DNA sequence: ATTATTATATTTGTCCTACAAATAAATTTA
DNA sequence: TAAATTTATTTGTAGGACAAATATAATAAT
């Protein structure tokens, strides 16, 4: 079907007629908002690759492709969309990275199950993110940590509690908690929620959290020495307390962080 | 420098010697764990594009590229890594999608500020995700919603409360709450946290949440009619209550969801 | 007729060349 | 010195080519 081509063609001439979209060749270079020119939006340039990517994503979802279903081959897609195979491959390369499709060399491509967090994993680097994003991530850990008590108490097992005990027993000094010990303890808590996405997500956030706190909010790394609620306290409540008690303790445990932003 | 080539070459022959990695041409097709063959891991195939992508990401971060810094051009990168410009472009296409780099046509590429959530946005489609991921997302909304009270009370403004009031006033029937009204109210709460990443993230999760609940846990869409805690109740507490009270009310408000999983 | 072997077509991965178009830099002209 | 022109650079896009492995079809052998 030439529907795609036709629509693009219509959109092209319509846009040219309204002259609110600038082109380079067939490539839309910028879409300008006619109604509010004042807010000078960042130029949204859509290359052919961008458009093919969107087109493919729409095609795959709207046609109900399920994992394992075979995709049309690259040449067919290219002809259908009237672009070169290069452009199609660049778009498919993106979908492959996201895990949406899988290429079996010399056999064809199949639909796959996208990994929800792989896109974040590649980007979550403290050195790259904006200050705003870093601050938000910093805060998000606090939100997440305050949100899990119900799940912890509903799903905790003897095995989990023993592991936490063991993690604490490996702790060198009761007063100073190293970064690794901190991650080990809290990481185990996330794991105990039984929620894989949450666990991975939170673990991804940890380094950023640390980076933000030590870099921008406080230079003294031994701030936690005087922590009024230790990991031992938290574990004790997790054993014989309630979600509310645990949350209150966690708030105090993280008080120094809360204090720096709220 | 031919260092890259050299290292790859060494790794290649080492791997071949150990015969724990299978090749097709120069492409690593699968890396097999020698120690535990039993767990039959999914084949991890690394194409040239994958390797160039990793290589580029490492190069950009390790060399401290900041937003606005100019990248080497495609030809140079290709020569340096000893691959074709096509492969480099496929890798760069991925980085462009993630917002890590920006291409200014005919002038060169520059480092950009990656968008933390764009990778998730493209993939977060209920029809594509695995059951496991959907369940996890479903639960994550509950965690997040239980985690925000401290932020809400610390950052609420008169303007926010008035907006919530207005949202509720637009509500048709006090007994039945439509999906749109639900999203409007809770969406405003997320926005009130003052955390942009959180707000976007939570808003992304909403459709999936709804999809999971209506599709798998309950077919009766009017389940919330008998909700013991309404949006009005939540707003009242938000005005004159405490974070703890609000959280307790929120738990009851979401009780039907909690009941279906905990 | 069934099996084994061989040949063919298919398809991704990779490389190469080419050129348009716009910008930046260099050069020439006024 | 300033303006105009030319040149070089670089991404975006197109298209051709081929290796290698797989699936399919065709052929040969038992």
Image (cartoon, coloured by chain):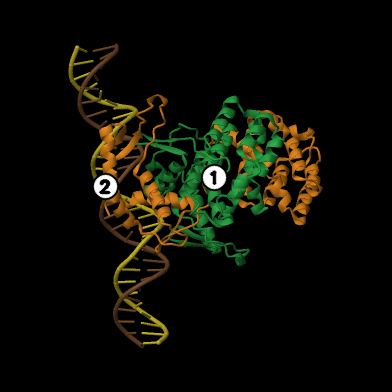
Chain colours: A green, B orange, C brown, D yellow
- Depicted B197 relative to depicted A159: above or below: below
Give percent across and percent down for residue A146.
66, 41
Q: Identify the secondary structure beneath mark 2.
A: helix
Tell me residue A90's x, y (percent): 40, 48
- The mark lying in front, picked from 2 and 1, is 1
From the top left corner, tell me how far across and down residue B11 is, in percent.
29, 41
Q: Which chain is indicated by disc 2?
A: B
Q: Are marks 2 and 1 on the same chain?
A: no
Tell me if I can see residue B63 in this picture. yes
The N terminus of chain B, quarter of image: bottom left
Q: Chain of mark 1?
A: A
Instruction: Name the element at disc 1.
Output: helix
Q: Quadrant of residue B228?
A: top right
The residue sitting at 56% across, 48% down in the picture is: A209
Q: Nearer the viewer, residue B21 or A71?
A: B21
Asked whether, in this view, residue A212 is left or right of residue D3, the answer is right
Residue in the foreground of this view, choosing between B100 and A249: A249
How many numbered circles are shown? 2
Assess whether mark 1 and mark 2 are in contact (beta carbons under 8 angstroms).
Answer: no
Q: Is residue A50 above or below residue C1?
A: below
The image position of residue B30, as x and y in percent, is 35, 34
Q: Which residue is mark 1?
A: A206
Residue B200 can be seen, yes or no: no
Image quadrant assignment for residue A196: top right
Instruction: Identify the residue shown where x is 54% and y is 45%.
Output: A206
Q: Residue at x 77, y 41 (%)?
A: B245
User: In screen coordinates, is B168 left or right of B58?
Assistant: right
Q: Is residue C7 left or right of residue A107?
A: left
Distance from disc 2 to disc 1, alpha carbons, whole Å, reads 35 Å
Q: Tell me the quarter of the picture where residue B253 sits.
A: top right
Quickly name the residue at label 2: B6
């Amino acid at each position: 079907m030439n529907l795609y081509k036709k629509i693009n063609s219509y959109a092209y001439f319509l846009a040219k007629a309204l002259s609110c979209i600038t082109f380079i060749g067939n490539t839309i270079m910028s879409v300008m908002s006619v109604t509010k020119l004042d807010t000078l939006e960042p130029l949204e340039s859509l290359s052919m690759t961008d458009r093919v990517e969107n087109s493919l994503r729409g095609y795959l979802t709207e046609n109900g492709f399920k994992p394992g279903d075979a995709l049309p081959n690259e040449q067919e897609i290219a002809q259908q969309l009237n672009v070169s195979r290069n452009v199609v491959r660049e778009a498919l390369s993106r979908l492959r990275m996201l895990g949406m499709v899988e290429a079996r060399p010399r056999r064809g491509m199949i639909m796959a199950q996208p990994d929800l967090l792989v896109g974040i994993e590649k980007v979550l680097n403290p050195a790259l993110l904006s200050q705003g994003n870093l601050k938000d991530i910093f805060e998000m850990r606090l939100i997440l940590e305050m949100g899990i008590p119900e799940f912890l108490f509903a799903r905790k097992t003897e095995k989990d509690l023993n592991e936490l005990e063991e993690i604490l027993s490996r702790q060198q000094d009761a007063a100073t908690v190293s970064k690794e010990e901190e991650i080990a303890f809290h990481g185990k808590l996330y794991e105990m929620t039984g929620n894989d996405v949450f666990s991975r997500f939170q673990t991804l956030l940890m380094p950023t959290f640390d980076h933000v706190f030590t870099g921008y909010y406080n230079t003294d790394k031994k701030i936690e020495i005087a922590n009024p609620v230790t990991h031992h306290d938290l574990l004790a409540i997790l054993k014989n307390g309630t979600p509310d008690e645990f949350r209150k303790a966690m708030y105090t445990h993280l008080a120094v962080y809360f204090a720096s932003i709220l």
